[in-house]
Image (cartoon, rainbow, N blue to C red):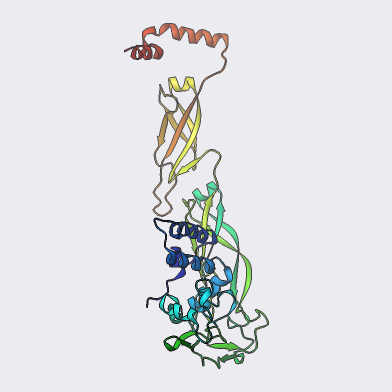
Amino acid sequence: MAEKRDYYESLGIKKNATKDEIKSAYRKLAKQYHPDNKETGNADKFKEIQEAYDVLYDDKKRSLYDQFGHAAFEQGAGGGAGGNPFGGGFGGFQDMGDINLGDIFGQFFGGGARSRARASTGPIRGRDLAMQVQVEFMDAINGKVVPVTINHDETCEACHGSGAKSPDAIKTCPTCHGSGRVIRQHQSLFGVMQEETACPQCGGAGKIITDKCPSCGGKGYNRKKKTINLNIRPGINTGQQLRQPGYGEAGQRGGQPGDMYFEIYVKPHPYFKREGNDIHIEIPLDFVDAILGTTIDIPTVYGDKSLAIPAGTQPNQILRMKGHGVKDFRTGKPGDQYVHLNIKMPTSVTRDQKRILEEYKNTSNANDSFFAKFMKNFKK
């Protein structure tokens, strides 16, 4: 009989997935495997996806699952809504005297895997966390150390994560004798069957606490709010992540804390637009400068730089400033800056300006005008 599939694997997500990512993955897969979908519908697959979503989207259930795996939701392993994994699937066959057909169906159609999901009685690493950090555009270009406030669970300093008032208050569980597992026997159509589950008294920990730590109430951790300095490296961009080891949730039973992942969102700039490591900017240019050519100072992310505008520059022409883009986040190699020229035409001219323009027009060959060339090609 195959092992029950990991919930995170069922949804195709990472263990540090956010609730939005969990919901998005569930909606996509549920639509694909819903039994009403004639092409890709799969009732068993849909049930698996639904079960994974019900656990991972609920913070308390997810925390239990991260600690104890599937054993956290076995019958007798904690009660509540997750106590019976077949409450919906075999509702009409649950209890027939001493024969529990729900258990039988579970053994043959996937439920038996729950009996082999072992809860660890040793140290458990804390869960990773993720949060979004907004960064100013120029800070992302040049790099900066920014203060970030986080909320996470830290190991209780009073009990060092044990949850007990003193070491003497930690006892070996009398039910499972420290193994964290118990054997259940039940009658079935095929005789007496055995099933291994998490111990209902200690929840699979193998230990019980007789006197809880007054500081954390027996949890082994306390919620803390703190401000840390996050090093924003030059060239970072929206969607990239920075990992801060040890700032995730507290570990249990002496386990290491998880990590905090900061997902970067770079705020837009009013003039610069970034595409990868390239920078784009639109610059207004007087039509006379476009005709005659000139040299102007162009804003870049590293300050103003001179750019030669060639004579005869056309509307919407793009000039490249090589090496004036963003330095790559990893290699340090710079991108380019692209200058989009927006040639501005005057809406009115003075008498002298009009005279000069008419002189220019009169000195031009009428047959060589842009309009004349257009009409010539149009009539071909």
Along the line of sight, which residue is nearer the eye, 193 or 211? 193
Q: Relative to 252, is 350 above or below?
A: above
* Residue at the limit of the structure toward the right, as seen here: 214
> Residue 143: x and y, percent?
51, 52
Which of the 4 quarters of the picture holds residue 295?
top left
Along the line of sight, which residue is nearer the eye, 298 or 340? 340
* Residue at the limit of the structure toward the left, as seen here: 380
Along the line of sight, which residue is nearer the eye, 333 or 220? 220
Residue depicted at x 50% and y 59%: 21
Residue depicted at x 63% and y 90%: 210
- Asked if residue 365 shows in the view, the reply is no
Q: Going by the image, does 309 lie left or right of 257?
A: left
Along the line of sight, which residue is nearer the eye, 22 or 289? 22
Circle count: 0
- Asked if residue 222 shows in the view, the reply is yes
Q: Going by the image, does 307 lie left or right of 210?
A: left
Q: Relative to 51, is 293 above or below?
A: above
> Residue 152: x and y, percent?
59, 68
Image quadrant occupied by the C terminus:
top left
Q: Relative to 372, is 185 above or below?
A: below
> Residue 239: x and y, percent?
48, 53
> Residue 229: x and y, percent?
57, 61
Image quadrant occupied by the N terminus:
bottom left
